Amino acid sequence: MTVTIVGSQLGDEGKGGVVDVYGDAADVVARYQGGDNAGHTVVHDGKKYKLSLVPSGAVRGKIGVLGNGCVVNPETLFDEIDTLRERGLEPDVRVAERAHVILPYHRALDGIEEAEKEDLAAGTTKRGIGPTYEDKAGRRGVRIGDLLDPDVLRERLEYVVPQKKALAEEVFDKETGEAFDIDHLYETYREYGKRLEEEGMTVDCGTFLQERIDDGDNVMLEGAQGTSLDIDHGVYPYVTSSNPSSGGATVGTGLGPTVVGQGDVIGIVKAYLSRVGTGPLPTELGGVEDQTPDYDPEEGAGEDEEALATQIRDEGGEYGTVTGRPRRVGWLDMPMLRHATRANGFTGLAINHIDVLAGLDEVKVGHSYEFDGEEIFTVPPTTEQWGRCEATFKSFDGWPDVDWAEVADNGYEAIPENARTYLEYISDELDTPIYAVGVGPGRGETVIVENPYE
Ligand code: GDP
Ligand code: IMO
Ligand code: MG
């Protein structure tokens, strides 16, 4: 059976930690979209692992698969595998032959296009994600399987590279170097192909996973990013270029929707909001220069609000795992979560970071929006409309800071009462049961209410 883990907001909800907790019962952990734009922190045996491509489960000795819906930068992949090996682990990572390869020109073009876009820039991670998915849809991409076949690789590069070079030089007026050189690319990427082959890393993802399921194995499908970053269901154009939502778990692995639908789909919720990048955020607290739309760093959002934002940002360590950028923060946004619950069909929720809010007198939630004089309960379809929404807040009494590791040991009832009231409000509004509550970053700091594999 499968269990699917999906970010319900804007990424960094603590998916990696939940995959780690539930992953114990899984035999295989497969990612179904995204690439090294993701950043997961997994704490294991007191050691912190920051992974962007290798599925989090690989730290725990599971087979990690990068599905066909992923975009793979082989340089990052082998760097991470080598680092994990240096730290004494033996990650078993397989890559779908149908997954697309991020090439150096994709990364170069990501940077060039972001600079060019100005107000339309999403604040990407500049990992080449968008340009690679563009080439996939444009049917000019290079796939992992192509790296294993010298003739096909050369043919693909000879077709596409002159176009990319012309785009960079003639449209964007930029100089190009070896990132746009066919021979250099061919040689470097053939080497990656040989290593993938030598280490027996490539798979036909759907067949591989289905066979494991038929043999009775537990498969975890690990989403990266979050639903509001989904290219179809998110805050377009300030989104990533793939489908983090649960539909992506089927097309991005080759398992049928009826197979994925037999298992749980767990929405990972951060108890407040964080956001790396631009776009509207009606419940935002304070602001971050170059990310918050129309933010004036001189004026700020008022001293109290900026102080509260800084407190949450620092307590929650809200600085990007991949880029180190300060993340924007805000109160929980229920319209965003109602939208995510519908789009993903969540069967359970894991709500993280309630410890970060501990000690505040009051915790607020954006319960609904006021939009053109009306109260609405979910997000409107266009981003311009979303930008006009004003949050209507509900207020909750705060809860004290306690020994959270002890709470995790003693179970749900040990969570401070006011925090439980907050959690139950979320669960009731979304009509979805709570499966887990994150009370700290460590592996032992999760209250497990329900185990989807039992
Ligand atoms: P992901 O991208 O969704 O996998 O999340 P990240 O790993 O990028 O960001 C989540 C961060 O919060 C990591 O540093 C986690 O260790 C940490 N974290 C996860 N759950 C909790 C929690 O319940 N409380 C606290 N304080 N930190 C958490
Ligand atoms: P994890 O898996 C948070 C954001 C970027 C940008 C937009 C597009 O750690 O939750 P991209 O490089 O994908 O083209 O950038 O998406 N973004 C993330 N934000 N967590 C992530 O991943 C993200 N991956 C991309 O900041 O706004
Ligand atoms: Mg992350």
Image (tube, helix red, strand yellow):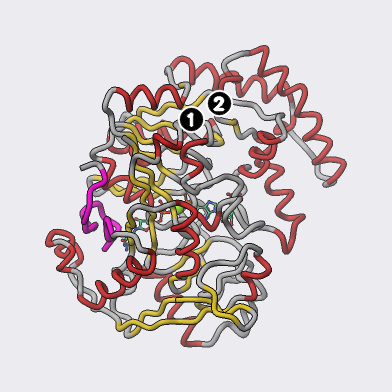
Tell me if the residue at label 2 has its CB under 8 Å from ligand 2.
no
Q: Badge 2 local density, few (<14 within 10 Å), some, or many (20+)?
A: many
Kindly indicate whether the residue at mark 1 contacts the one at mark 2 (C-beta within 8 angstroms).
Answer: yes
Magenta stretch bounds: 434-452
* Helix, strand or loop at mark 1: loop
157 horizontally vs 204: left or right: right
Q: Is residue 445 magenta?
A: yes
Image vertical order of residue 242 relative to residue 196, above or below: below
Could you tell me the amino acid type at mark 2? Arg
Image vertical order of residue 147 relative to residue 123, above or below: above
175 horizontally vs 83: left or right: right
Using the rendered image of the protein, determine whether residue 62 is visible from the camera's viewpoint: yes
* Quadrant in the picture for residue 214: top left
Residue occupying the point 48% across, 83% down? 305
* Quadrant in the picture for residue 31: top left
- Residue 201 position, x and y percent, is 44, 22
- Residue 107 position, x and y percent, is 65, 41
Between 250 and 274, the one lying in front of the other is: 250
Between 262 and 43, the one lying in front of the other is: 262
- Residue 282 position, x and y percent, is 55, 74
Residue occupying the point 49% across, 49% down? 245
* Helix, strand or loop at mark 2: loop
Comes first in the chain, label 2 or label 1: 2
The label shown at residue 342 is: none
349 horizontally vs 335: left or right: left
The residue indicated by pointer 2 is: 98
Residue occupying the point 80% across, 41% down? 168
Name of the residue lying farthest toward the right:
170
The residue indicated by pointer 1 is: 254
Residue occupying the point 47% across, 27% down? 95
